[in-house]
Image: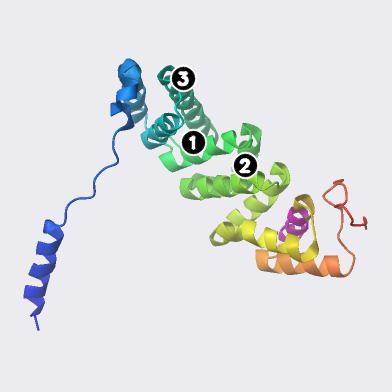
Amino acid sequence: MLGPRLALIVLIAVALARPALAAPPDPVADGRLTAVRAPLRAVLDGADRDGLPRDLLQSKVREGLAKGVPPARILAVVRSMRDDLGRERARVRTRLGLKHPPAALLRALLEAQQAGVAAPATDALFAALGKRAKEPGLVAHAVEVLTDLTLAGYPVDRARRVVSLVATRDPGALGRVRADLERLRRAESLTPAEAVDAVARGLERGESIDKALKSAQSDQAHGRGGERGRGAPAAPGKKSR
């Protein structure tokens, strides 16, 4: 058997011999972008200086190339995205007092905007998070979950109630919110609005998300669905209570 010191030497030698992971190729170097390479690189370099996520802009360049988008259009889209990121950074600085917002938070806010989650909705989420809005990682996660729920058809303002309550009380459960709501919907044949409102009612009573889900199922079983999605129409084939 190798002694501890010799084993360590072997491990170090293997690590040094292993080739470094190759960085993804710079999309701006693509020959199709020759005509716009200089201004495009200037946009990316400016994003770096301003603390904006360069990788997100590069991904957009790769997407444009893959789709055969004309170079001038790629440049215009990347410039527009860079401006959007700059506005989100300014908003985060004003609303949350973060002088240097992390790239993950800016990315989450841009993706929320692109999904139809407008600034007033995320501003309301910031306010609902209270003191926890000073935790950029938590805010980014909450925004991501809200975006995911919106894309899945949950009304954004109602989804925000659930996301903010879970984020402030049990942030570790944020990642399961959509799966929990989907299970509740399937089990009880609820619309997205009905499901999210049913869980919000339990959370607002101080219940954990697990207890809120059980309460929602119990209410449905006993015909106490409450306000059906606050005016939402009944699901097809399902009588209003």
Contact, CB < 8 Å: mark 1 with mark 2? no
Amino acid bearing label 3:
Arg
Horizontal side of 46 relative to 5 (left or right) equals right
Q: Quadrant of the C terminus?
A: bottom right
Foreground tag (3 vs 1)? 3
Vertical comparison of 206 with 23: above or below:
below
| Callout 3 crowding tier (Cα within 10 Å): few <14, some 14–19, many ≥20 | few
Residue in the picture at 65% in, 54% down? 165
Q: Nearer the viewer, residue 205 or 11?
A: 11
Mark positioned earlier in the residue sequence (3 or 1): 3
- Locate residue 83, reporting x and y percent: 47, 23
Residue position for label 3: 73
How many tags in the picture? 3
Whether residue 170 is visible to the viewer of this picture, yes or no, is: no
First along the sequence among labels 1 and 2: 1
Q: Name the residue beneath numbered marker 2.
A: 127
Quarter of the N terminus within the rendering: bottom left
Answer left or right for 12 relative to 147: left
Does 70 lie within the magenta span? no
Where disc 2 sits, the SS reads helix
Q: Marks 1 and 2, Cα distance to the nearest angstrom?
A: 12 Å
State the CA–CA distance, disc 2 to disc 3.
37 Å
Q: Earlier in the sequence, mark 2 or mark 3?
A: 3
Check residue 238 in the rendering and tell me which mark sits there, or answer none: none
State the image coordinates of residue 187 (x, y, percent, origin top left).
76, 66
Q: Position of residue 228 (x, y in %)?
A: 86, 52
Q: Is residue 56 above or below residue 1?
A: above
Q: Which residues are magenta?
A: 195-204
Residue 181 lies, in percent from the top left, at 69, 59
Type of amino acid under label 2 = Ala
Give the distance between the C-alpha atoms of the residues marked 3 and 1, in whole angstroms: 35 Å
Which circle marks residue 97 in the picture? 1
